[in-house]
Image (cartoon, coloured by chain):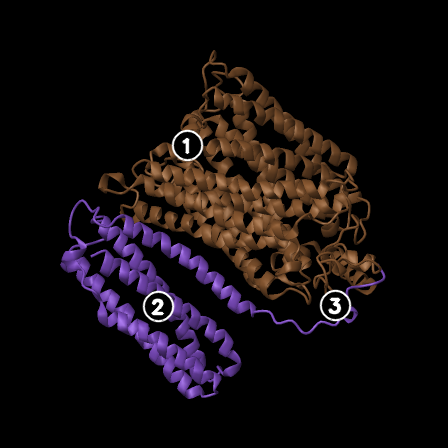
Chain colours: A brown, B purple
Amino acid sequence: MAGSLETALALEQEEVGLPRLERVHQWVVTVDHKRLGLMYIGAGLLFFVVAGLQAATMRMQLALPDNHLVPPAVFNRLLTMHGTTMVFLVGMPILTGFFNYLVPLMIGARDMAFPRLNAFGFWLWFFGALLLYFSYLGADGLYGAGSAPDVGWFAYAPLTERAFSRGNSTDYWILSIFLTSVGSTATAINIIATTISLRCEGMTLNKLPVMVWLALVTAFLMLVALPPLSAAQVMLLLDRYMGAHFFDTQAGGSALLWQHFFWIFGHPEVYILVLPAFGFASEIIPVFSRKVIFGYQVMVAASVAIGFISLGVWAHHMFAVGMSPAGNAFFVTSTMLVAVPTGIKIFNWLATIWGGKLRFRVPMLFCLGFLFQFLIAGLTGVILAVAPFDWQLTDTYFVVAHFHYVLVGAILFMIFAAIYYWFPKATGRMLSERLGRWHFWLLLIGFHLTFDPLHLAGLYGMPRRIYIYQPGRGLELFNLIASLGVAFQAAAVLLFIINVVRSLLVGAAAGDDPWDAWTLEWTTSSPPPEYNFAQPPMVKSRRPLWDLKHPDDPDWSYE
Amino acid sequence: MSASLAPSVYTFAESERPARGRVGMLCLILTESSFFSIFVAAYLFYIGKSLTGPYPRDVLSPPIVNTICLLSSSVTIVLAIRNLRAGARARFALWWLITLLLGVEFILGTAAEWYKLIYRDGLTIHTNLFGTTYYSLVGLHAFHVSVGLIGLGIVLLLALRGSVDRRHAERIEMLSWYWHFVDCVWVVVFLTVYVVGR
């Protein structure tokens, strides 16, 4: 172990000695899963700031009734770019970035199964992402119409047809999302092949860390759920450029078909984003409760069940289009069914915490925030799953508040938990605990100020996507509070950026295993050498480091 | 940390994991199946919904010869790989060439069918929903056949140069899995377009 640490330090020093251009070049040509993972996360965080500023602009516009800060056309572009960016350029890359970084380390492998495919996937995603933002410059097209896409993140037909969406802005949306999806597919293939084929000796599927199991389920969902969107986008391109009629209602095409295809992708996509968050929670909560995860096998089974059920619930986004009673009944039931395995997971996390010797460090704080907020997000989800209730609330701010509770309250909180938890491994430096606490509390307060009142605004009938509202409808107070909350969230993110920069410059050295954790990534040096492990490890239980630290009481005598 | 997880601590038998290439190819086939199924769903959804002619019954006839050629290419590619594993490189190249020619016949047959549909029957992707779904589904499949033919062609060139031997059998078999997949998709496309859709 000591030997590998010295080699790693020597390698690092060697690299520091190189000219700057050469160091950049090494990042560009790298096929190392750790560097690609960090590049995914870094690029994702940059887009997070951009999409966050877009959201802040929209909240400023909506802070007061009859406000004229942002013209309606710009507002439409903002909400489209905010949604598309947050899903495809923030959530997906950060989460696949973590998988890229962690899966090989956690299973004792030296790299992903297909390192060059991995790099190919990253660059495809990256240039796809740039293409979306290039639309601001290049989307004028032949008609001088449009700039960035303005059709909403689910781009309902026939609004996206050539007759209604002139210029090239919609084409930028189609092509960039198509490219990023292909990139994500490459990553998904890699995650599955790595997990199946490259596990170290003794690492049976029954001993995989829970996060790796969730990576497996997520990758499976990506393989099955991303192609429907890509296929529908190909059809839309054929409509727009070859004169096909897939979604052309005047030639008998169906606008409804787009909704089905989009949500066959769109609903599993929610789980593609939230399952990694479950994975992080399942690694972090046990370490900071000083207990093994409660009900490992049930936890894994519940994850797999969520993966399968999530493929059969898509039309609960479409209750308002008027499906048959049988269709409604099916999708109400299947949607409510998701609550069962999800509830199992929440109870298992609680049971892991129960009676544990809790350490309230920053990653654990974010996990507790996640548990509380994800529960509420799930409860409003069950409310919206009831078709008659959904008819009342569809396309209102209640829906907006519900899915932001999932995306921000659960996923973003777990992304921050994961960053605080694994930052020491990736950089060799600790993030500041004090700044981290400020970050957590400001984000928590800002999150609730913004999104709690939006539930009420939705119940009061405020439709989503409007750029303006009249005074005297009972919406002023909710919107004002929601917009004030943004300031807290922005301050929290600013503190986070300061924390990261400060730690990279003068952070305390982390050592190999700062949290006294149990999975394989903590056996190697921080940051790990390019080859991860000098000798491929061999494991005998789910907590190989516990066995190592407690040879008198190893886990494998119980499992 | 002084101790380590070096393998000498435990005595496990050498573990046997599936080859990464096989897992990767199966994943690719899974994701491609999902892609195709959306086009098949669109085809089935739009059967009988064209507002104007020509209709499938009037202009489509099942491409029996094409189908036989493509399906038998799955047999010849198996024979090719069997010969490669046995070290018979000349026979491998011969069967591989036959596979390639059967694939080329299929593409040419599709081209002839499209030529007839476009110039004799006046059916384009723009004409009606039948044209839209027909050309996109059959075209998507033909695109996959073409990609497969490029792969087959590269291997053939390498084989003629004498640089393919039994060490490459595993990788070449993965290419053959893709080819089998393209064949299986054709069975689905054939049933959808020429049996159910007519």
Q: Report the residue at 50% width, 37% height from top.
A: A83
Chain of the residue displaying label 3: A
Q: Secondary structure at mark 3?
A: loop
Name the spot of residue A146 as percent of width and height, x first.
39, 35
Identify the residue position indicated by label 1 in the image. Answer: A387
Q: Which mark is residue B183?
A: 2
* CA distance for labels 2 and 3: 44 Å
Q: Between tags 3 and 1, which lies in front?
A: 1
Q: Report the residue at 57% width, 42% height from top.
A: A342
Identify the residue position indicated by label 3 in the image. Answer: A535
Q: Is there CB contact under 8 Å for labels 3 and 1?
A: no
Name the residue type under label 2: Asp
Instruction: Please tell me in which quadrant of the rendered image residue A324 appears.
Output: top left
Same-chain check, marks 2 and 1? no
State the quadrant of the C terminus of chain A.
bottom right
Q: Residue furthest front?
A: A558
Name the residue type under label 3: Gln
Count neighbours of disc 3 (C-alpha within 10 A) and say few if under 14, some if 14 to 19, many if 20 or more. Answer: some
Front-most of residues A168 and B82: B82
* Residue A427 vertical position relative to residue A531 in the rendered view, above or below: above
* Residue A237 vertical position relative to residue A455 in the rendered view, above or below: below
